[in-house]
Image: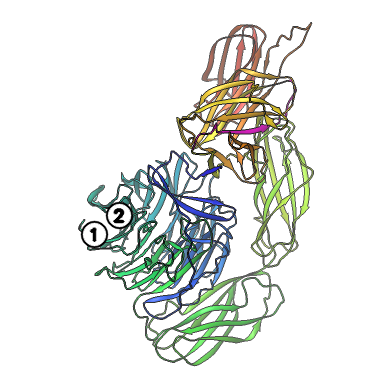
Amino acid sequence: MLLYLLVASQPLPGLYFESENGAGWAKIFTGKEWINETPLRGQVVSPKVADTAVLWVDRNHGYAVAEHVAITGDGMHIFAGWWLNNERVSAYRTLGTNVPIWVDSLPDAEWQIRVDASQVNRFTSAAPGHPTMDCYDKGSATPLWEFAYPAGFSASGWKTSAVSYDGAVAAFIGSNGVVGKVWIISTATGDTLWTREFGVGGGVYGVDLSDNGSVCLVTRYDSCIVWENGNLRGKFYHYGQVPSAISGDGSIVASANYNGTVQVWRWNGSTYVLAWQDNVANSWATSVDVSRDGSTIACGTGYSNGTLRVYDASSPAPLWTYAGYGGYGSGVWGVAVSGNGSHIIAVSWGDTMTNDTFKVITVHDRSSPTPLLTVDGRSEPGSLFSCDISDDGVYATAGGKAVHAYQFGNGGEVYAIIIGASASVNVGTEAILSPPRFVQLSSTYQVQARFRNYGDAAASFPVYFRIDTVGGTVYSSSASITNLAPGSPQTITFSPNWTPPRYNLYKAYAWTALSGDQYHGDDTLSLVIKCFHDAMAVRIDQPFDTITVNQPFTPGVTVKNNGSYTEAFEVIFNVYDSNSVLIYSDTALSSPIAPEAQTRVTFSPQWAPPQVGSYTAEAITRVTDNYYTNNDTIRKPFQVTYEIIYDDGSAEAYYVVDFNYDNNKFAVRFTPTVGPPLYITRGRIYVNQANKPFDYVILCPDASGRPDTAAPYDTVFNVSASSAPGWAFFDFSPDIYLTSGSDVWLVIHWPPSSPGAPGVGADNNWFIDTRSWWYKNSNGWTQWTYHDWMIRITQATVPTEVAEGTGKPRFWVGSPSPNPLKAWATLSYSLPDETDVQVNLYTADGRLAGEIFSGKQGPGLHKLTLAPDVPAGVYFLRLVAGNQKAVRKIAVLR
C-alpha cells in the first residue's frame, strides 16, 4: 500500500492530515508512533433554542470540513473556512439563520482555509495553494483586495492570517519551504506596510496581532518571533505546531507546546521574559489563547484524555481544570477567551466511543469549571477543530468535521452560540433576499429583506432599503413592521421594484430603526451587487516555470467569470521568444461559466519549445462589454532547459512506498527529447528530509513498459539532500552515452533500515503525466496516477565528430542552462584531448567576477555546476582549454 506523508521536513511530533478522493482524516505523531482510528458514529442534529444555547448549526457542508472559524468582536458575524471539497469561505449573521449571507468559492485551496475577524467588519483568509491573501468586508463575497504571494511562496501554518481588533491591519504568513515571510497590509488600501523574512525553523504555524496591528507575533515550530512596526521586539522558545496568542496591547504572549507546558511571556520594555510556565500533566498542550485585556489565559491539552485549564495571567496555578471530553481521541484542539476574560469556549475532537456523553463543545464562566453550555456526542457525531468568542463573551462559534477526526470521511458543521441573555429590546436585519448579488442590465428585481425581533417583547418599527453606487443613491424606500412577535422574522417587499440603470458595482443596505433598541450592531446589513460583464485571466497553468526543450505540452489557462452573467468568452494564448517575437498563438472559447466561477481553457495544437532559453507566455480574455480591462491579460516568463521535467517544481505532498521494508522503490519513465545520440548527465529528487540517503539510484533501459533493473546503465549510491525540503542532486560519472532515443527509467531504492524516509515530493497540478510508479516485492511495479513524482534527469546533446571511425570528440562549449540563472546552472563542454581548463566569470565591462574552475581534464564531455555569489545582472563565462577559447553570455536573477 502506498502511504501519504504530509510533512515538509523531518517528521516532528504533531498533528497531520491525510486525504484521498475527497475524504480525509487526522493523524497524531507522538514522536514515537502514529495514532489514528476509524470509529463509526450516528448523527443527530442539534435543536435551535434561545439564550445560553446553540442558536443554529449549518450542516449543509457540501462534503467540506469547516476547519477554521472566527467571530467578529461585536459577535454579530461568523466567518468560516471550508476545505477538502467545495473549498470556500462563508459569512453568517450570528442572530440570523444557518444559511450564509454570502459565500466565496476558493477552488485553488489545497489545504485548510484559515480565517480571522476584526471587531466589526473585516475578515481575512488564506490557504495553501490559493494564490492570494484575501481581505473581505462583512457585507460582500467580493474581496476588498487580493494580495498575490510571491513566486514559490504559499500560505503556511494553522493560523495563516490575522486581522487587528480595530480592523485596520491584516497579517499573513507564508513559506517557500526554506524561507518564511510575514506580510503586514493595510486593510483600507491593500498596500504592504512592511514584511519580514525568517528561517522556517521546523515549520511556520501561526500569526497574531495586537489591537492596533503594531505588534505582530509569528509562531514557528521551534520559536516565537515578535516585531513592532517591523522592528524586532523579541524571539523566544517554542516547541510544536500550536499558534501562540498575544494580548491586545502586545505585552503578553501565551504559548502551548508539545512538551506539555503552557508558558507566559511578558514584555519588560526591552524584551520578552518568561513570567511563568505550568506543566499541564498531559503529553501535549494543544491550544492556547489570552484575553485582549491580558487578564485570562486558557489552554487545551492532550491528543487523548483532553482537558481545559484556565489561568489568571499573573499565576501558573490554574484557576480550575475541566476534564469532561473523554479518553481516546479527545484532545482539546481549540480554545478562545473573550476580550474581557469573562468567558471561555473550548472544542474537542471527542472520544471515539459511539453516541457518548463526552463533550465536544464547552462554554465556561471564568469563575467556574462547570460548563454554562455543552454539546456532546449524542447531538454532535463529529469532531470540533476551531472556536472563537466575542469580545464581551456573549456570542461564540465552533467549526469542525461531521465524523471523528480519526475517521476517514468528509462533511462538517458551523455552530452559532449565545451565552447568557440577549438584549431585551433588539431588532435587526437578518438577510437581504433581493436583488441578488448578480443582476443584469435592464432586468427588474423585487426589493426584499428579512428582519427579526431578537428581543423579549413584540415590537413595531420602521425599516429601510437603499442602493448606492458611484455618484450617489439610485434607490431608496421604507416600510413599517407592526407587532412583530419575539423571535419572529418578517419579510418585507419594498416598493417600487428596482432596475439597474447601467453597468456598475452597487451596494445595497437594509436596516431597522427601533426606538430604544439596546443593540445596534445587528441593525444594518449590506450586500455588494454586480451588474456587468467581465472576463478575467487568473493563471497560466501550462507551461510550468521551467520546461523541457522539444517536449510537447498542451497550453492551459485558468480563467474566471468576474461578472454577473453566465457566459462563455474568448481566450487567446501566445508564446514569445526572448526577442519578443510571437512564435505560438491560439484562440479558444471557454465553456459557459457562472458568475465568479472559474474553469481551465486548453489550446491546440500542442507546442514544443524548439530551443533552450527564455520565453514568455501570455493569456488574454475577451468578452463583449467587458467592464474591467486591467484583469484581461496575464504574462508568465518561463525557461526551457535540457532537463527532462514532468513536475511544476512545488510539492503538494510527500510519499514513500511503505513504512515497512519490502524492497521499496519509486521510478519515473523519461522520454529523451534531444538526439540520439545523447548523454544523461545528472538527476535530482525533491525530498522532505535532509541527510537521509536513498540506498541507491539507477538509470535503466525500458523493458516492455517497465524498468529493466537487471541491466542498469549506472548506479549512484547514498543520494541525499543537504537541506529540506529540497533537491537531492546526483551526477552520473562518466556521463551515460545513449545511441537511442528510447525511454529510460530512473529508479530510487530505499535502504532496509529506513523504508519510511525520506519522502519524495509529489506534484498533483495539471497536467499529470502518469509516468510515476512504485514497487515492492509483494505488489510488483504499480503505476501511480494521482501525482507526478518530483524526479528529474538532465540530457545533453553529443558534440562529437566521427571521422575515420575514431569517434574523437571535438572542442565544444554549450550554453549555460538554465539561462537566466536563479540559483544554479550547468555548463556543458567537450574536450578532444587532456588539457588545462580555466573557467572564469566576468562582468559586462570586463572585470573578473569569479573563478569557476581551474584544473586539468581529460577528453570527453564535462559539466560544471555554476552557483556564483554575484548580484543580479549580465555576465560572461570565458572558458580556456589549451589554445581553444569560448565565451558564453549568462544572466543572473536574484
**Magenta residue span:** 660-677
Residue, far bottom: 483
Which mark is first along the chain, 2 or 1?
A: 2
Find residue 891 and report its horizontal and vertical position in percent: 60, 29
Count neighbours of disc 2 (C-alpha within 10 A) and say few if under 14, some if 14 to 19, many if 20 or more.
many
Quadrant into which the N terminus falls: top right
| Residue in the foreground of this view, choosing between 295 and 760 | 760
Q: Is residue 28 left or right of residue 839?
A: left
| Secondary structure of residue under mark 2 | strand
Q: Is residue 601 left or right of residue 842?
A: right
User: Within the magenta stretch, is there residue 25?
Assistant: no
Find residue 277 and report its horizontal and vertical position in percent: 23, 51
> What kind of residue is marked 2?
Ala
Residue 397, numbered label: none
Residue, far front: 778
| Residue in the foreground of this view, choosing between 872 and 571 | 571
The image quarter in which residue 630 lies:
bottom right
Find residue 427 and report its horizontal and vertical position in percent: 45, 84
Residue 272 showing in the rendered view: yes
Q: Which residue is mark 1?
A: 313
